[in-house]
Amino acid sequence: MLKNYFKIAIAVLKRRKFFTFISLFGICFTLTILIVLSAIIDRVLSAGYPDTNRGRELFVTSLRLRSSKNASDINGGPSLYFLDHYVSKLQPMEALGIVSHNSMTSSYGSNKKLGIALTYTNDQFWDVLQFRFVEGGPYGKQAVVNAERVAVITKETRDRYFGKGVPATGKWIETDNILYRVSGVVEGAELFQQFAYADMYVPYSVARRDIHSTDISGDYSGIILLRSAEDIPKMKAAYAQMAARVPTNSAVFDILHTSADSFLESFARSLIDDHSSESGLGRFFVVVSGVLFLFMLLPTLNLVNINISRIIERSSEIGVRKAFGASSKTLAYQFIVENLILTFIGNGLGLLLSFIILQLISGSSLFPGRGLSINGSVLLSSLFFCLVFGLLSGVYPAWRMSKMPVVDALKAQ
């Protein structure tokens, strides 16, 4: 029976080439977008160089000050003072990496102007993130305490500033009219490694800002490295207890919301701009599910309309088959199978197009070192969406077709 359905479906698709093309285009385009986005999100959320210890890390990225007297608040990140004075004293903890937001600076190397993404860190930043040094090594605690103008630069920055393959350790690099002595050169992080990506890393003590400020809100982030993943609940509890005791140092804002999050929680919080003390995962999944539902709904409705048009064109066929004893159930099954075959063909084309697009993205500067790929979870997800897409767009038209009276079907032609 299925073999006959398949033969009929292929014949119908060949006979109505325009409808087939429109349907395949919609399916292929939808699935390609889903697969590419899934691959990128999977890559962003998965642990990778240099953040290889993510399974035993917590991230302090959000700090919200709120007033109990009015609706005013301040949303941002923690300050250097908050991280160094409060967070660093929590236990159990192996290390606390402190890193600022990137700032673009101007430099001149190899007789041309260069843009360098500069970030400020502490010495434990190099213990938390496992950078590969191709030259030299990181700056230590003494360099941070003494506010030494030293820097770790990426291999790409070295090649752009000094020349390709030219050793840089011990040399001086200038950016924003400040000279820094290069202590080491590392393999660069990907752009989407938000806590690790930069062109140049320098001690926070040389920043052009008041590092002695006692404000608890600022533009830094903290990465808490624990001894094992089992310590995560203990650290979250210790952090919550600490946050409840921290004074806001403000006459206006007297309520503090902050938390130590897993990477996924931190990503969700930043994406939906949720700075409350509760995890943003619930809202994140609701938003993602809603967007995914709407994204799938529009092409599904279009395909339903196309399928109904195909039904009207095939009304005489339906009438004749019903007149010769074909049941409504048989006709419905046939049309659903036809739609699933069309959907799976579109899925195959979508996979091929997705592979080509992912290869092009992998060849860009967004993902140096590691390419994007269609892994098992992404492939299974695409097949699942393909099945759902085919069923959603085929069930209603199949039901309409199966319920069409014989007389009306023959008259429609």
Image: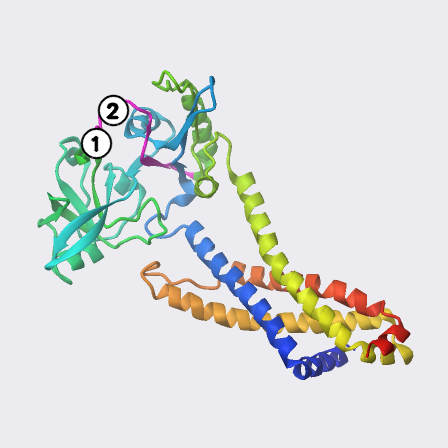
Residue 103 vertical placement versus 18 (above, below): above
Residue 130 vertical placement versus 250 (above, below): below
Q: Amino acid at mark 2?
A: Ser
Residue 18: in magenta span:
no
Q: How far is disc 1 from disc 2 in space, using C-alphas?
A: 9 Å
The 10 Å Cα crowd at callout 1, few under 14, some 14 to 19, many 20 or more, is: few
- Magenta residues? 210-228
Q: Residue at (55%, 45%) from the top-left corner?
A: 287
Q: Position of residue 315 (x, y in %)?
A: 81, 76
Q: Amino acid at mark 1?
A: Arg
Quadrant of residue 261 in the image? Answer: top left
What residue is shown with label 1? Answer: 209
Question: Visible in this render: residue 46?
Answer: no
Q: Quadrant of the N terminus?
A: bottom right
Q: Position of residue 245 (x, y in %)?
A: 41, 18
Q: Position of residue 97 (x, y in %)?
A: 30, 37
Query: Left or right of 51: which side holds 111?
Result: left
Q: Residue at (28%, 26%) from the top-left corner?
A: 81
Query: Left or right of 410: which side holds 396?
Result: left
What residue is shown with label 2? Answer: 213
Query: Left or right of 258: which side holds 201?
Result: left
